Image (spheres, rainbow, N blue to C red):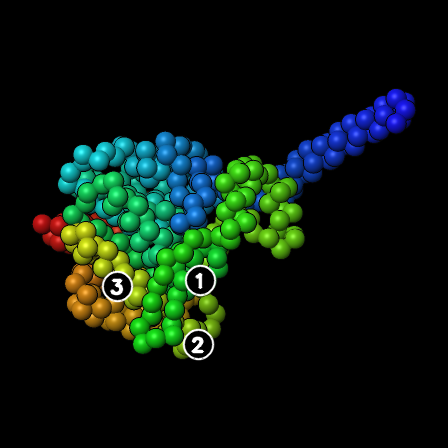
Amino acid sequence: MPLTRRRRFLFSLILLSFGGGLAVFLGEGLVRVFAPQPVVRPCWQNDPDVAFRGIAGCSYHDDWTPQFYSYDVALNNEGLRMPHDLSPTDTGLVLALGDSFLFGQGVAEAESFAGRLRKDIPGLVNAGWPAYGTGHAIKTLERLNTTYRSREVIYFCYFNDLYNNAVGDPNYRTHQVDTSGADIRLTPTLVYSEGKRRWHRWGIGDWLYKHSHLFVLVRRILGGDNGQPGFLRPRYDDQLPPEEIDYMEGVTLAYFRELARICQENDQRLLIVWMPCWRELTLANDTDWRNNFPFTAFKAAAAASAHANGYAFLDAAPLLDAALPDTGARVSTYYYGEGHYNARGHAWFFTAVTDTLQAWLR
């Protein structure tokens, strides 16, 4: 190839690269301004066991939904939202499992239920993480049990865990569900496909999911995901079909049995706390939220399962109702408009259940 042609080729390649880079830069800026996307929070990391968990020692300011809340998050040496690190020599630990409620999404750590409870229970380990279902809690328990010793485990089961537990999306589910026999069987499995796990190991995709609004938008247009865990939302306009209700109940009870089995093998006492839907309470529903799931029947089945499988089950709904003021209690008083408890809601839950939790721990 003559030198002049080679130079022309290199010059064209440089121009093409520069033009492509400029187009990406401008496109990123335009998307950020006019169509911002739900990028992944900075301190989240992909984990093939549970989809997402926290990065150890990381902190960030969460203003992803500023119309509802803006707050600071700091994670300890295990990537948990706690003000202090854990040590294998720690004693008197009480392991708390759950989702975004226990994590304290939307409020300062000191204002959260876990932050308030830690003042009474210094050994409380807050292992809650947003979007976790019961399978995620089980795998978190198994991971922490390899390093730390706790005698008590409390799983805060938010009502939408029933929906999350029924999700079969390989980008979210933690166990394979087998319904072919008389009893539902759960088999641990890795999240994501092998190709996606390799993509995450390289780290390029994780960086783009956290920093590039343009990348997330293109993925959505092409039918991909946005790097966030996907799961059903617990809001329905119509009654769920009976077969779907039966499946969600059966799978969740199977998860409860598995959680109890692991605790028994590790000489741990287990308490499952039912965190009710707003429709189970006497709050005035000043929102358009709907939920037609028959929680009463499920709670009766969960209580029977607890008796049969050697763990304790606490329905927090009566305690929450008893802690309400005589008049004026509304959904919007205790919940953000997107569904999470606000600071007043966390204080309400703490006031309602702390004496019962303390009695169980004694």
Vertical placement of residue 320 versus 149, above or below: below
Q: Earlier in the sequence, mark 2 or mark 3?
A: 2
Which of labels 1 and 3 is toward the front? 3
Distance between the alpha carbons at the discs numbered 1 and 3: 18 Å
Distance between the alpha carbons at the discs numbered 1 and 2: 16 Å
Element type where label 1 sits in the image:
loop
Q: Amino acid at mark 2?
A: Pro
Q: Is residue 164 left or right of residue 221?
A: left
Image coordinates of residue 163 in percent, x first then y, are: 40, 63
Q: Which residue is mark 2?
A: 241
Q: Amino acid at mark 1?
A: Val
Q: Is residue 266 left or right of residue 362?
A: right
Query: Which residue is at the front of the view, 142 or 64?
Result: 142
Is residue 361 visible in the rendered image? The answer is yes
Q: Which residue is mark 3?
A: 257
Q: Which mark is residue 167?
A: 1
Q: What residue do we see at 78% from left, 27% from top?
A: 14
Element type where label 2 sits in the image:
loop
